[in-house]
Image (cartoon, coloured by chain):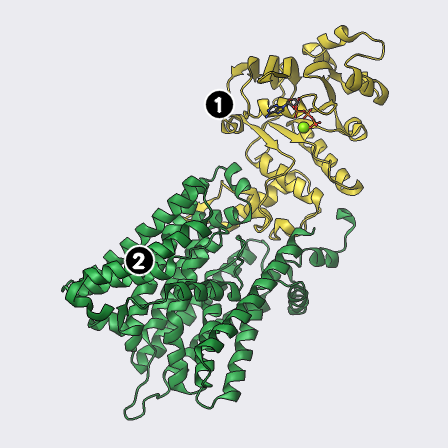
Amino acid sequence: MVADNAPAQAQQPLLRLRGVSKTFGPVQALTGIDLDIPAGQVTALVGDNGAGKSTLIKTIAGIWEPAAGQIIWQGKPVHFRSPKDATDIGIATVYQDLALADNLDIVQNMLLGHEVLRHGLLDEITMEQTAKQTLAEMRVTTVRNIRQPVGSLSGGQRQAIAVAKAVMLNAKLVIMDEPTAALGVSQTALVLEIITNLASQGIAVLVISHNLIDVFKVADRLAVLYLGRMATAGPVANYDTASAVHWMTTGTGPSGNGSAARNDAGLGGLSDG
Amino acid sequence: MANLREPDEIIAASNADASAELLANSVGDYARIWSRRIRSGESGALPVIIGLIAIVIFFWVKSPSFMTPGNLVNLMTQSAFIITLGMAEIFVLLLGDIDLAAGFTAACGAVIALWMLALGDPWWASVIVALIACAAYGALQGTITARLGLPSFVVTLAGQLGLSGLLLYLVARTGSIGTGGVIPLHDKVINGIEGSQLSGPVTWIVMIVIAVLAAAVIFFGDFRRRSSGLVAPPVSITALKMLAIIAACLIVAYVANLNRGRLIVIKGMPWAVLVVLAILAIWTMLLGRTRFGRYVYAIGGNAEAARRAGINVNRIRTIAFTLCGLTAGMTGIIYASYLGSISTGVNGGQNVLNAVAAAVIGGTSLFGGRGKMLHAVLGGLVVGVIYNGLELLGLSASAQLMWTALVLLAAVIVDRLTRRGQVAR
Ligand SMILES: Nc1ncnc2c1ncn2[C@@H]1O[C@H](COP(=O)(O)OP(=O)(O)OP(=O)(O)O)[C@@H](O)[C@H]1O
Ligand SMILES: [Mg+2]
C-alpha cells in the first residue's frame, strides 16, 4: 500500500512547478509559479484569501490545465487532462468537503471504486484487512470499529478516513485543502499527527492552511502565495510567524527584499531539506 | 476528544446507525445498543417486526376469522404483489429516486403476457417478453432521469400518466381477447403462482431446505469473519439470527400445511411465497454482495463521493431503473395470477404508493442510501395485514386507505428524524 515510496531521490524533488500560470478570463489567478515539492516532507501553502492557493492545488490535481508553464513529475514533464490522470500517477487530493458517503462504513468508503472481488462477489474480508492495514500504517488508532458508518465519526476521524482513502491508492503526493479548518483542538492534533506520519513514510504532503500555528507545527517547507505569485518558498526554519504574516499580507519579506527570497522558490531551499 | 473517549462513549457516538451486531460484544451490549438506536429513531428490521406482531395480535383479538389457516394463506397471496412491487421501488429509493410509474409498468407487462398467452404462445415466452418490455421501459425512464438530470419524481409521474394511457390502448388493441376491458388468464402455470400450492410434504421439504441454506449463509459468513480476526458479531447474536430465520420458515410451512378447505382438504404453501422468496434472495445478493449494489448505496449516500471514486453514476442509475422495471414486470405476472385476469381498471397509481409505503414502513429511506430488500417483505406484510384485517372487520376501503396512510406517515417521520440524527454529528 504505502510502502516503497521511500527511495528518496535526494536531489530531485518529486514534483516541480515551473512558471505555471492560470487565468480565469480577465482574472490572472496564478502567475509564473515555481515550486518544488520533495518526497517525505510536508510543504505548507499559505496566503491570504484569493491568493490562488485552491487554484494552484486544482492545477496540480488535474482539475485545471495551466495556461502556461510546466508540471514536472519525478523529472518528467506531465500533462493532466483530467483529475484521473493525476490520481493515476500518484497524486491524491483530499478536498475540504471530503466526499465520504455517510451511510457506508469505513471499509466501504475507503475502498469505494476499488472493491476487491472474489468469485465475482465482494470480498469483504480482504477489503477489511486492507483497510485495517492502511489505518495501522497511518497510525490511526482512534477508530475502534472500522465497520461503523462514516456518518457516526468525528470531524478529525472523517478527515483521517479521507486521507487513508487517498493514501490507499498508492499516493506519492497527498494534497490537503484546509484539513483542520473545521476541527477542534484534539481533532486538529489527530490530523496533524497523520500529516507527520505520512511524511515519515516518504510521502510528499502539500497542505493548505490559514492556521500558522498548525503550519509551524508540521511543515518542513513553507510556500507563500501573494496575489497569484509565489512570494517566497523555502525551509520553514527560514521563517517565523511574524515574517510569514508579513509575506502573506504584503508579498515582501520583513526586510523588504522580495526578489531575493523568490529565487529560493526553486531548488535553492532543498539543499537544507 | 477522540483519543480520550471510553469504549462506551464510542458505542454511544456511533449508535445512530451502526450495525449493532458488529459493535456489540455480548447480548447485553447488543440489547443496549438496540434500545439506544430505537430511541434515536433508527428504523432497522426489529421495530417493524414488533409492529407487525402488534398489528397481528390486534386483528386476532378483534376478528375471529383473522387467525384462521385460510385467511393467513390468503394474506400471503394478497401481499405477494405489494412485496415485489416494493422490492422494485427499493432499487430506486436507495438512490434517493422514486418510480411512480411502476404500478402501470406492472399492469402493461401483465397485458403483454396475457395477450401473448391468449394468442397461444407458451407461458415462458410470454413471461420473458413481458419482462423484457418492462425492463426496457425502466431503462428508458432511467436514461431520461440520469442523462438529462431530471428529477425522477417528474419523469416517472409523466410515465404514470403515459402508461395508464398505454394500458387502455393495449387492451383495446387486443380486440376480442380483451372484451369489456378485461383479458382473462387461462394458463395453468401462471394461474398456479397464486392459485395453487405445493403439496404438504414438499412444503416442509422446501421450507426446511430454505431455512438450512439461509442459516448456513449467516453461519459461514460470521464464521469466516471471526476466523479471519475481523469485526464480527458475538456468537450468541449469530445463533439468534439463525434461530429467527429457521423459526420463520417453519412457522410459514406449518401454517400453510394446516387444512384450510371447507369441503375438501386444502393444504400446502402457495407458489407465490416461493416466487417472492426467490426474488428476495437474488436481489438481496445483488445489493449486498456485488459491486453494483455497493455503488447504489454509495450514490444514495453521496453521489459526489461516488463520482469522485470513479463510479459511473449515470450508468448505475440507469441500471437501477431497469431492475425496477424488471421487478415491476414480475409483479405484473403475479398480480394477473392473483386476479385471474388483467383489466383496464387496474389502479396502478395506488398500487405503487402502497409499494413505496411498504418499503418505507419496512425501514427503507425515502432520501436514499439506506434500505434492504427484506424491508419490502416486512412492510408489504404490514400493509397486507392492515388491508386484510380491516376488511375482515367490515371496514370500508376508505378506512383501509386512511390507516395505511397513517402507518406510512409514521414511517416517514421516523425516517426523517433518523436522518436528522445522522447529520447532527
Ligand atoms: N472557477 C473560477 N472562475 C473564475 N475565477 C476564479 C475561479 N476560481 C478562482 N478564481 C479566482 O482566482 C483567484 C484565486 O482564487 P483561489 O480560490 O485560488 O484563492 P485561495 O487562495 O484559495 O483563497 P481562499 O483562502 O479564500 O480559499 C481569486 O481571485 C478568485 O476569484
Ligand atoms: Mg481556497
Q: Position of residue A57 (x, y in %)?
A: 62, 24
Where disc 1 sits, the SS reads loop
Q: Position of residue A27 (x, y in %)?
A: 62, 17
Q: Residue furthest left?
A: B120
Pointer 1: what residue? A81
Give the chain letter for green.
B
Numbered tag placed on residue B165 in the rendering: 2
Q: From mark 1 to mark 2, how far is it between C-alphas? A: 48 Å
Rendering quadrant holding ligand 1: top right
The residue that appears at 70% across and 17% down in the rendered structure is A227
Figure check: B391 above or below A38 = below
The residue that appears at 54% across and 63% down in the rendered structure is B363
Q: Residue furthest bottom?
A: B263
Q: Indicate left or right for B392 with A264 as reference.
A: left
Asked which quadrant contains residue B200, the reply is bottom left
In the rendered picture, chain A carries what hue?
yellow
Residue nearest the observer in this picture, B154 or B8: B154
